[in-house]
Image: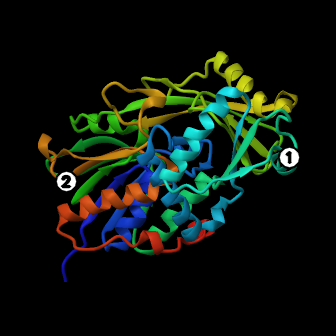
Amino acid sequence: MTRAAHAIVIGAGSTGSALAHDLALRGVHVTVLERAGVASGSTGHNQAQLHSGARYAVNDPESARECIRENWILRHIQPEVLELNDGLFVAIDEQGMTYRKTFLEACKACDIPVRELSVEDALRMEPLLNPHILSAIQIPDGVFDPYRLCLSFLATACQHGAKVQTFCEVKNLDISNRIVKFHSRITNKTEVLQGDVIINAAGPWAAFVGALGGLQVDLEPSAGAMITIDRRMCNMVINLLAPPGDGDIIVPQRQTCILGTTSWKVENPDHITVPPEHIEAIYKVAETMIPSIRQTHARGAMAAARPLMVMDGTGGRATTRGFTCTDHSAEGAHGFFSVVGGKTTTARLMAEKVADRVCAFLGIEATCRTQDFPLLSYRKWLQV
């Protein structure tokens, strides 16, 4: 009997969790190392929007197509963590009406279903909307619970032999021998782990992890501020019908709403200060969609960094929400991979593409099964 290949995944956000699930289904022995808790980084601090892809259809159609495909898949494999409440794009001025035709054509080209509503129907569905909106377009957006989604991926991975070690911070990488040295805050001991492959899925911290082994990982940590308010002001995800900008999404989440986001480049994802002017900018746009939004109380403001790909001539909102997987073999790091970019909505797809490359490196012939494989309940995490 041959020994199962061992993959060490660094990071237990949506990408790392989905990757652990995919590799475990292919018969790979997986160990996940996470320096804090599950989904404690960018995944657990995002706006929790299950994207239909409509937001990206005009300027980033490839990402839009990925989003709508993964939207349908997540509905099938883990509906328990989703609120399938759809979304509205609303025009509040003539600029929005001008953008409307381009938007509808782009959604059609990306196979994103849309339904134009009368203003009266939109206001019946969402009574707190601005009564002066000029147009409303319904799209299959939704809401997910990022923590529970990661737990579902990991619980299913553990059922197939994966091991998840939280509060274990990587301190050093011996690239030539594929050894990871990490410190466990649970045992207060420094330990080592050797694998056949190491996958850097640390999100905006991927560059820091790569540097531990003398490797360069190119990414742009782009922060986004959000505000959580104390009331659920809408039942659907409300989007501004305009090119993507600051503060143009309102996402209902249980009995709250998350308003956001903004965008600016940061150097260190661990130290992000929310600029006060960003809070005002978010409110200013949000109240054009729901005028009574300022009558609520803010439960808190937060910011998280997006691990965006570095592309010539772009940055921030202009950067694709696609993803890339880098094989560092050209740098002498055979068996070391880094994944950058993407969104929680497309985490399963990212994992599939990365797992394909990892299995090719390992010489494993096993196809991806995750798009049809129902995830365990997040509650099963307590039993693994």
Quadrant the N terminus occupies: bottom left
Name the residue type under label 2.
Gly
Marks 2 and 1 sit apart, C-alpha to C-alpha, by: 58 Å
**Residue drawn 74% across and 40% down?**
135
Provide residue 6's location: percent of width, then percent of height: 27, 64
Asked where in the image residue 115 lies, by quadrant, the reply is: bottom right
Q: Which of labels 2 and 1 is toward the front?
A: 1
Which mark is first along the chain, 1 or 2? 1
Provide residue 219's location: percent of width, then percent of height: 35, 33
* 379 lies left or right of 71: right
In depth, the one of 41 and 65 nearer the eye is: 65
Badge number at residue 120: 1
In depth, the one of 288 and 323 nearer the eye is: 288
Evaluate whether residue 226 shows in this view. no
Q: Which residue lies furthest to the bottom in this view?
A: 1
**Residue drawn 86% across and 46% down?**
120
Asked where in the image residue 76 lies, by quadrant, the reply is: bottom right
Evaluate whether residue 78 shows in this view. yes
Residue density around tag 2, few if under 14, some if 14–19, many if 20 or more, within 10 Å: many
Circles 2, 1 touching at the beta carbon (< 8 Å): no
In depth, the one of 146 and 240 nearer the eye is: 240
Q: Is residue 188 above or below residue 247?
A: below
Q: Is mark 2 on a helix, strand or loop?
A: loop
Asked where in the image residue 224 lies, by quadrant, the reply is: top right
Q: How many labels does the image show?
A: 2
Name the residue type under label 1.
Glu
Provide residue 165's location: percent of width, then percent of height: 44, 56
* 299 lies left or right of 312: right
Badge number at residue 335: 2
